[in-house]
Each structure stands twice: as C-alpha cells, then as structure tokens.
Image (cartoon, rainbow, N blue to C red):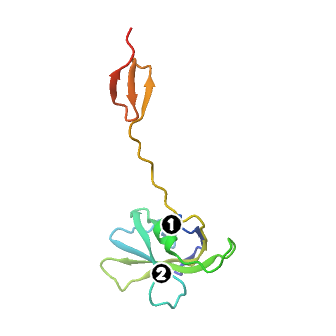
Amino acid sequence: MSAGVYDFTIEQGVPYTFQVQYQNPDGTPKNLTSWIVLGQVKEKVNDCVPLAELETEIINPIEGLITVTVTAETARNIKIRGSKYNDFGSLVYDIKLWPEDNLNDVRRLLNGVIKVSPEVTKVIPTKPEIKSAYLLSFEGFKLKSFDDSYLTTVIRN
C-alpha cells in the first residue's frame, strides 16, 4: 500500500497538530498496539540530516489514531529564505511505522510538503508578576482573591 500524501502550511513559531488514522485495505482501523511511529522533516529528500523530528504519538492504538505535531520551537527554528510573507519555505517530511517485533517491516504512512510562512514577531512574552490582586465579592461579604481563598471580612452587618 502506498503512502498517503498530505501537504500543509505552518506558521513559523506556531505549533501545528493533526491526527491521522491508519486503516486496513478494507477501511477498518489498523490496530497499532506495539507499533512505533516516527517522522522527520528535511529541506530536501536526499539530505542526510533532518531539520527536525516530528512529535508523533499513537494516541489510540485500537483505532489506529496517530497525532503528529510540529512544536512551536521546531517551527520557530526553521530557517526561511526570503523577506516577504509570500516567500514560503518548502520542506519535505514523511511518517513511518514499524511493529516492535519486526523492525524490518517498515511502512510509510504519510509524506508531503510543509510550507512555512515566516514570522516577524520573535519575542516570547512573559507574564507580568502580580504582587497581590483581590476582587471584592459580595458572597458572604468577604474579600476574595483570584484563587478563591477568602482572606478577610471587609463588611459586616
């Protein structure tokens, strides 16, 4: 059975996740209990060293469901040639499967092209530190913190 083709576009610095179901020729889910799944991204098919490893996980072996993720860090580290948003970088990838008890039985599940849209904002924000924050709540006339712990009675009848 030949591999499926799935081309997709990611944004540089932004995670991308999709799910795929491996099926038997009759359309029923392939049981992937005790199987291994791996995926790599390269600039060219013949490159010896991958640019990145895809995060792959068999999330439901009985149903043959696999999650594939390009992490934000992976997407951020992909180099783009060009200076405009329509200067997409193009990469290739594939995803392969092996049964744990027969690593010679390699199956290519998917392959395709990943287009990468360049990012401009490369700063990762940090949350401002909140020293103390309270909301006045009229539930039982108490001062209520954001974590729902009651601190002090502020109004009495």
Q: Could you tell whether 126 is left or right of 112 in the image?
A: left
Q: Which tag is nearer the camera, tag 1 or tag 2?
A: 2
Say if residue 119 shows up in the picture: yes
Between the C-alphas of marks 1 and 2, the distance is 22 Å
Residue 148 vs 72, above or below: the answer is above
Q: Determine crowd level at label 1: few under 14, some 14-19, many 20+ residues with C-alpha closer than 10 A.
A: few
Position of the C terminus by quadrant: top left
Quarter of the view holding residue 32:
bottom left
Mark earlier in primary sequence (1, 2): 1
Single out the residue that lies furthest toward the front.
131
Question: At 36% from the left edge and 86% from the top edge, which residue is drawn?
Answer: 104
Residue 127 vs 79, above or below: the answer is above
Q: What element carries label 1?
A: strand
Question: At 51% from the left edge and 91% from the top edge, which residue is drawn?
Answer: 46
Question: At 40% from the left edge and 17% from the top edge, which residue is drawn?
Answer: 141
Q: Position of residue 57 (x, y in %)?
A: 40, 67
Q: Where is residue 130 in the image (x, y as percent from the top left)?
A: 41, 42
**Image mark count:** 2
Q: Position of residue 8 (x, y in %)?
A: 60, 71
Residue contact at pointers 1 and 2, CB within 8 angstroms = no
Say if residue 70 shows up in the picture: no
- State the residue position of label 2: 51
Q: Disc 1 marks which amino acid?
A: Val
Q: Nearer the viewer, residue 111 or 22?
A: 111
Q: Disc 2 marks which amino acid?
A: Leu
User: Which disc number belongs to residue 20?
Assistant: 1
Q: Which of 135 and 76 is in front in this view?
A: 135
Q: Where is residue 127 in the image (x, y as percent from the top left)?
A: 45, 50
Question: At 51% from the left edge and 70% from the top edge, which residue is drawn?
Answer: 76
Q: Which of 82 and 53 is in front in this view?
A: 82
